[in-house]
Amino acid sequence: MLKLVTVELPEALRGPLVELLPANPTAFIRNGGGIIGFGETTRLTAKGPDRIQALAKAWRELVADADVVDSVNLPGTGLVAFGSIAFADSSESESILIVPEVIIGSRDGRMWLTSVNGKAWPKQTEYKTNASLELRSGLQNRAGFEASVQSAIDAISAGKAEKVVLARDLEAAVPKNFDIRPVLSKLADKYPTCWVYSVDGTFGASPELLVRVSHGQVSARVLAGTAGRGTDPEVDQAIATALAGSHKNLAEHSFAVDSFVQALEPFCVQVDADSEPFSLALPNVWHLASDVHGVLKQEASVLDLAAALHPTAAVAGTPRAAAQALIEELEPFDRGRYAGPVGWIGADGDGEWAIALRGGQLEETKLRAFAGCGIVSESEPSAELAETELKFQPVIGALA
């Protein structure tokens, strides 16, 4: 049985979450708020087509047997697990839920500490200074990616799918003493509105919220359609305007929103999505974005919804099955947890899950980063390659 106690964090111990990270941290942070984890008491794992449902079931069983004392009662207090889910049904990567030994959280000006089985907050260790990592082409080089994009365009023209999302990978050798904390700190500083995550070696700064459940309310942010930022303010605004009027990008975005709403509707009394996408500004790119809101009509956890929503058209394509088949055919690698759900779940089933984008995966002495883009009939291989370069910038910059 797990025994947990959550208390307000004393003023003298408080500080920015990104400055309190332990070695090998677990984290889910946005705009300075969120939760970070120290150590590990419990790990739930699953593989295969029903991996998310299996984790949701195992989580309910774990919660039923836990003893929780929570004097704070905010989202992220009490019994919480951090999770990272493999993208594909066939992936060799395990999907996981981790309950840390100690959790520190921050929300609305309040900070708390959750101790699991009486564990004390470990002594803070100094962040190390890493040498810059050089990312090079992995299993899919630039020419190979352009060829795969052209094959996808041909398949779409032949009526096999309407949209497919293809990715390419970069790799770097990692020294044994590599410290991920400075990387997370850079990402949190430069991309404060993104969800900065670190779970079992999977890390990044995602601009896309897959799903949030809080007291029966469901929310999400769907992104599809991208353009690079301009250095001149007038040029930059012109780029945003052009993106908002681009038939190719609007079509790609429409596929993503429509499929998301359809997947969410069985769980909700009502689902509302923005009637028109808005241009979301990140430091290096513009995205077309739509916010989606719903009201649950039945008891469902955030993992139950993630199981229904993943993979969205924004990271797989549409129709879903056809797009996934093309990804299996055209990508020469296992995505692992890239583009899978990453986030946290509480004892009540509420939680937040982003999509694992703009980051990478640490695998012992190797780091793998991924970037992808949506392919539709109007796509051009060279333009899609250029888009992946933009999407690699956050992780490349954080590793420099």
Image (spheres, rainbow, N blue to C red):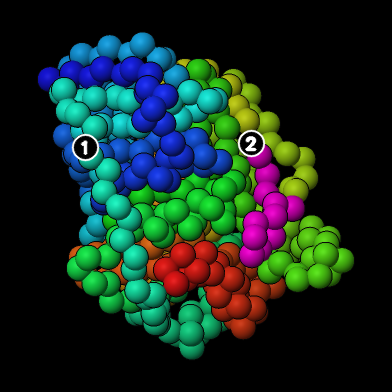
Q: Amino acid at mark 2?
A: Val
Q: Residues within 10 Å of mark 1 (few under 14, many from 20)?
A: few
* Residue 258 picture location, percent across and down: 63, 45
Of pointers 1 and 2, the one earlier in the residue sequence: 1
Which residue is identified by label 2?
Answer: 292
The structure residue drawn at horizontal position 69% and vertical position 60%, both measured from the top left corner, is: 286
Q: Is residue 285 magenta?
A: yes
Tag count in the figure? 2
Q: Amino acid at mark 1?
A: Pro
Q: Is residue 261 above or below residue 95?
A: above
Q: Is residue 106 above or below residue 87?
A: above
Span shown in magenta: 279-291
Q: Residues within 10 Å of mark 2 (few under 14, many from 20)?
A: many
Q: Quadrant of the C terminus?
A: bottom left
The structure residue drawn at horizontal position 33% and vertical position 13%, both measured from the top left corner, is: 70
- Left or right: where does residue 325 sit relative to residue 272? left
Distance from Cα at disc 1 to Cα at disc 2: 40 Å
Can you see residue 253? yes
Asked whether the residues under the numbered discs 1 and 2 touch, taking CB atoms below 8 Å apart as contact, a structural biologist would say no
Q: Is residue 216 magenta?
A: no
- Left or right: where does residue 209 sit relative to residue 176? right
Which residue is identified by label 1?
Answer: 122
Task: Work out which residue is located at the far left of the displayed protein and give it.
Answer: 1
The residue lying toward the viewer, choosing from 260 and 72, is 72
The residue lying toward the viewer, choosing from 30 and 113, is 113
